[in-house]
Every structure is written in C-alpha cells, then in structure tokens.
C-alpha cells in the first residue's frame, strides 16, 4: 500500500498554466535577479527561528511536567539572576547545515517560488524532543532528529523524506491516523499536498 497520498493533483495543471503564461520584460528580469541575493539571509533566519523553538525540549529534564488527557505542560522557571537573552550557536556545532537555495533564473520564471518554503516542528519519534523538517526548492528537504542539548542529526534518508526533484513550499506535523505518532503533510508546487504516515519510530 502506498502511504503517500495526493490530495490536489489539479494543482499540477494550474501551476503549468501559470508558468506558461507568465512573462515579464527583460529589464525587469535583471532587476529582480539582482535583488534576489538579499533574500537568502531571510531564509537562513527560518533555520535560526526553528532552533530557538527547541528551548523547552533542551530544558525538559529540569521541568516539572503535569500530565493531562492528550497533552502535558510544565510551568517555566523564572530567572532570578544571570544574563538574559540569546546566544548564537554555530551550525557546525548544532548539526544543522540546511540552506534553501533558489536559482535566479527559475525565480523570474515562476514568482510563486519567491514565497520561500516551510519548516515543520514536532516530536516525530516519540522521545520527547522537538524534531525539525525543512522544505527546499533547489535544495532537497531535510529531517533533523533532536538529540538533546542543542544537537541534531540528519535522518532524512532513513526516514524516506528527502523528496528530490520537487519545489516544496510547506509542511506540517499532525497525528492524522490517531495512533499517537506525528504524520507529515508536505506541499509542493506541481505535486499538490501529500501525506506521509509515521510508523511510530520516525520512518514514513
């Protein structure tokens, strides 16, 4: 049974029409291409924001968790003293080396690509830590397993979620089949929205 489900095959036809009909003057093309280089730092910011959201997982052992039906929560301790703020963590130390790349020529042929891509966050393997899934355009999608203490491992290939040769624009984790493990929705231009079912151990 194929666990990859297509929900919007008609999007492929719509995108083909948009790309075929889209045309802009050559002078404007050059201006857009020159301005694209400034967009890459914005995409890198998405990586930084995703890392920051794992702060609760990093401090999880020291929190007092309260279990409720279908969820748990923990009051965060108040910092009484010490330096408050954020510290820059190098990508080499964290283990996340993802960069969402887009060729200048492709961007002027289809402006939908300039909207960028998405990031999904969730505990996909049930170890209590927040894992990260990055969508890519000219870059392949990447799944990073949270090892704790601000360390991540690239588990894209064994999970079956690299999804080459497609423009991925968004993703979301959700327990679709109600088995207690997070499944993954991935949206892509020309491929619609697909659902990948999790076997409970982080394999899709």
Image: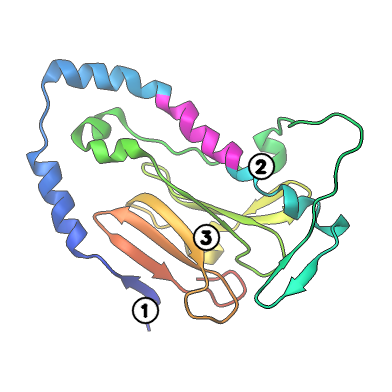
Q: Position of residue 122 (x, y in %)?
A: 59, 60
Q: What SS does tag 3 mark?
A: helix
Tell whether 23 sits left or right of 183: left
The span from disc 1 to disc 2 (Cα, nearest Å) is: 35 Å
Indicate which disc, 3 or 1, sits on the residue closer to the N terminus: 1
> Quick check: 52 above or below 153?
above
**Disc 1 versus disc 2: nearer the observer:** 2
Q: What residue do we see at 64% from left, 43% from top? A: 51
Q: Where is residue 197 in the image (x, y as percent from the top left)?
A: 47, 74
Indicate which disc, 1 or 2, sits on the residue closer to the N terminus: 1
- The residue pinned by badge 3 equals 157
Which of 96 and 195 lies nearest the eye of the viewer? 195
Q: Which mark, residue 52?
A: 2
Q: What residue do we see at 47% from left, 65% from top? A: 184
Q: What residue do we see at 81% from left, 31% from top? A: 84
Residue 13, quarter of picture = bottom left
């Amino acid at each position: 049974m194929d666990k990859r489900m297509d929900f919007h095959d008609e999007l492929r036809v719509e995108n083909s029409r948009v790309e075929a009909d889209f045309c802009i003057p050559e002078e404007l093309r050059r201006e857009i291409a020159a301005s694209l280089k400034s967009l890459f730092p914005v995409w890198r910011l998405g990586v930084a924001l995703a890392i920051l959201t794992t702060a609760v997982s990093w401090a999880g052992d020291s929190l007092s968790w309260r279990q409720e039906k279908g969820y748990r929560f923990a009051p965060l301790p108040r910092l009484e003293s010490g330096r408050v703020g954020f510290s820059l963590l190098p990508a080499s130390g964290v283990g996340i080396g993802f960069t969402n790349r887009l060729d200048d020529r492709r961007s002027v042929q289809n402006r939908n690509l300039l909207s960028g891509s998405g990031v999904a966050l969730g505990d996909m393997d049930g170890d209590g830590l927040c894992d990260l899934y990055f969508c890519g355009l000219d870059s392949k999608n990447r799944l990073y397993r949270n090892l704790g203490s601000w360390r991540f491992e690239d588990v894209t290939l064994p999970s079956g979620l690299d999804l080459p040769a497609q423009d991925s624009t968004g993703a979301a984790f959700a327990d679709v089949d109600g088995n207690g493990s997070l499944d993954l929705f991935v949206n892509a231009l020309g491929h619609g929205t697909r659902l990948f079912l999790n076997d409970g151990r982080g394999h899709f």
